[in-house]
Image (tube, rainbow, N blue to C red):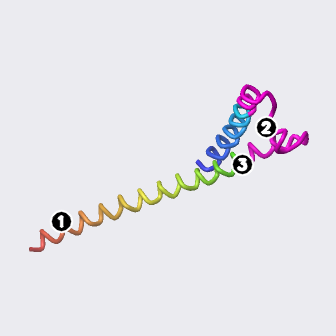
Amino acid sequence: MVVLCTFVGGILGFVILVIFESLSFLLFGRSLSTLIFGHSGLQALIAPMAGCILGWIWGNKLKDNQEQARINRELEQDRIRYEREETKSR
């Protein structure tokens, strides 16, 4: 799950870079990322890397949420089981 989210994040980072470049050319007639990074080409590395990091964080958050949901289900089942035993003993 985490690996998939990281991969998707990297692809989305690159797609967002392409959209940002297209919009900057349409609106300003020049590339804003070239103004920020110069002609080094770092934007092509930084955007997918940032997307991978955000995807990794998102994947870990999803994994934590799934684990918490599993724990909550187990607690709810234990509570119901305890209430049934409590009513039987009365």
Q: Residue furthest right?
A: 39
Label pair 2/1, CB-CB below 8 angstroms: no
Label pair 2/3, CB-CB below 8 angstroms: no
Camera-nearest residue between 43 and 4: 43
In the rendered image, residue 63, in percent from the top left (x then y), is placed at 53, 54
In the rendered image, residue 75, in percent from the top left (x then y), is placed at 34, 64
Q: Secondary structure at mark 3?
A: helix
Nearer to us of marks 2 and 1 is: 2
**Separation of disc 2 and disc 3 at Cα?**
18 Å
Label 3: few (<14), some or many (≥20) within 10 Å? some
Q: Amino acid at mark 3?
A: Ala
Mark found first going from the N terminus, 2 or 1: 2
Q: Amino acid at mark 1?
A: Arg
Left or right relative to 76: residue 36: right
Camera-nearest residue between 18 and 9: 18
Camera-nearest residue between 52 and 68: 52
**Separation of disc 2 and disc 1 at Cα?**
66 Å
Q: Please give the residue where the numbered disc 1 appears in the rendered image.
A: 84
The region drawn magenta spans 21-50
- Residue at image position (64%, 40%) is 8
Nearer to us of marks 1 and 3 is: 3
Left or right relative to 42: residue 22: left
Q: Residue furthest front?
A: 28
Q: Please give the residue where the numbered disc 3 appears in the rendered image.
A: 50
Left or right relative to 78: residue 4: right
Q: Amino acid at mark 2?
A: Leu
